[in-house]
Structure formats: C-alpha cells, structure tokens
Image (spheres, grey):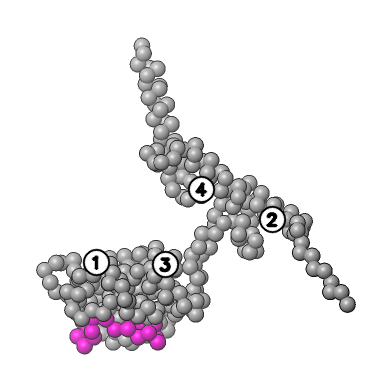
Amino acid sequence: MRILPLLALTLATTASLFAEEEYVSPVTGQKFDPNGKFTLEQIKARDERVLKKTGGFIRQKAEGPQTLFVDAREKPTLTVDEVARLYKLGTHLDCAFEKTARGEVCPLEFAQKIMAEKKPLMVVVVVEKAEKLPALSVYPEERIGLVNADKLKGGDDPSAPEMRVSKEIWRAMGFIGGVGFSMADNDMMQPYYTLAEIDANNHPYIQPMNMAKMQKMWKRFGVKKEARIPYRVAVQQGWAPAPTNDYQRAVVEELKSEKERGPTNPIKIEPKKQ
C-alpha cells in the first residue's frame, strides 16, 4: 500500500527536476544546468535583476554586403559551408554559401561575374580543373579569392586536401581584407611554400587579433556586425522596437520620465563679469 505514495513522490521529484532543466535564461539564452555552480533560484534572481535594469537584450542585425563563399566544383563538399559557418560565428557578420558549378568558364571571369551580379563584400571561390592556376590566387582590388583544390591534393591522409582548402579560404579572406602575413607562428596568415607547411599549422583560421585588422575594410564598405544590445541602450539611441513585456515598458517609462524631468544637476555657467 506504500507503493502509491512512494511512486507519487518519485514522479513529483522527477517533474521538479525536469522543470528545472527546462528553464532557459532570458538573459543569456542558456539552459539551466542542475549540476552547475548556481541553483535555479540564484539564476532566476540574477535574471530578474538584469531584466529590471536593462529590459533584456535585443538583437541588432548585421548590415552591409555579405561575404560570399562559392564551391564551384562539380562535386561540392561540406568544407566551404563549414568555413562560412565558422566565419559567421567568429565575426558576427552576414555571409552566404553557394554551390555553383563553374563549367568551362575562366575562374577569374567566373568570380568577376559573381561580384557584378551579387555585389558581395568579397567572394572566395573554390575551383578545380584549372591547371595554370596556383593553389591560391588573390585579387585584393577586386575583392576576389580563388582556391584551386586540385593543387592541394596529395599525401596519405584522405582528409588533408579538404583541410588545405579550408585553410586557403581563410587566407584568401585575410589577404583581401588587408591582414597580410602574420608574425605569429600560430596564425593561418603565414607564408607557405609546400603542402607540408600548410598541414603543419594546427590553427586553421585567422587569429582574432589579426582578424581585427579587417575592420577597416568592413567599415569602408558599410559592414556592421550583428550585436546583442540592452533594450535600455536601444531606447536611448532611438531605434528600439515597441516594448513587448513589463520590463521593457518599465524602462521606457523610466527614460521618458527622466527626459521630461530634465537633468537633476544641470551645469551652471556664471556669466562673465564686465
């Protein structure tokens, strides 16, 4: 007869744990970890404080032309798509990935046509069957990079050629964006002369400090990063959307009252005595 109360207690405990695990912070977007450092009550209390102060966070979309990655091989792989994903994750910029077979068109003419039609920030195209083309060709003035996958083949490791393609895509972006050769040994922007040297680098992307050099180019072409902005700041800057919850409405009313009330301690400038 005691089985039913025990079963009820077990179900209640399970339901409680499940409810805790399902809590997603409206501030960080992170799911509650019952094995984490803080309890659910502590996390909720923190979220409440942040929401009251900021009104929460809203996402400001990236602006300006996209970086475009094109796999122009007859049989595209996941490599270029993965570079695009990491690029967006690391830079918070818009980018696009396309699979468009080049056919018999000259690689440079193919890329130039894409630039003319799509008008991206820059385009990096992976090609094949281009014997006269080196492994990496960069045309900074035209914001075009060409990666010749055929020149990156070879070796006993079957995954090596695609890893080289990935690295050369990053290097193409770096040269177009003005990064140039890096002095850091752990950076992808190193001068390479053999496939073995490319393989030896275990950092298959541009380091953040060098990536920062590309901001000058981004700014020139009107590119802005995706950003996560406190609702309070967006209201102060005048571009916030209409409030959707009590926290945001409270922030709007508070800032409205402050504006109507004026500065509490205005600066007093005494007139000069004649």
Tell me the mark number nearer the camera, choosing from 3 and 1: 1
Which image quarter is the C terminus in?
Answer: bottom right
Residue 144 on the magenta span = yes
Label 4 close to label 2 by CB (< 8 Å): no
Q: Is residue 103 left or right of residue 223?
A: left
What is the spatial separation of the Cα atoms under label 3 and label 4, in whole angstroms?
A: 23 Å
Displayed quadrant of residue 90: bottom left
| Badge 3 element | helix
* Image quadrant in which you'd find residue 258: bottom right
Q: Position of residue 177 (x, y in %)?
A: 40, 79
Q: Which residue is mark 1?
A: 202
The amino acid beneath tag 2 is: Leu
Residue at the spot of label 3 = 91
Amino acid of disc 1: Asn
Name which residue type carries label 4: Pro
The residue tagged with tag 1: helix, strand or loop? loop
Extreme residue in the front direction: 274
Q: Are marks 3 and 1 in contact (CB under 8 Å)?
A: no
* Crowding near the residue tagged with mark 2, few <14, some 14–19, many ≥20 C-alpha atoms within 10 Å: some
Q: Quadrant of residue 96?
A: bottom left
| Residue 10 visible in rendering | yes
Taking the spot 41% from the left edge, 74% from the top edge, the residue there is 67
Mark 4–mark 1 distance (CA, rounded to whole Å): 37 Å
Q: Earlier in the sequence, mark 4 or mark 2?
A: 4
Dot in front, 4 or 1: 1
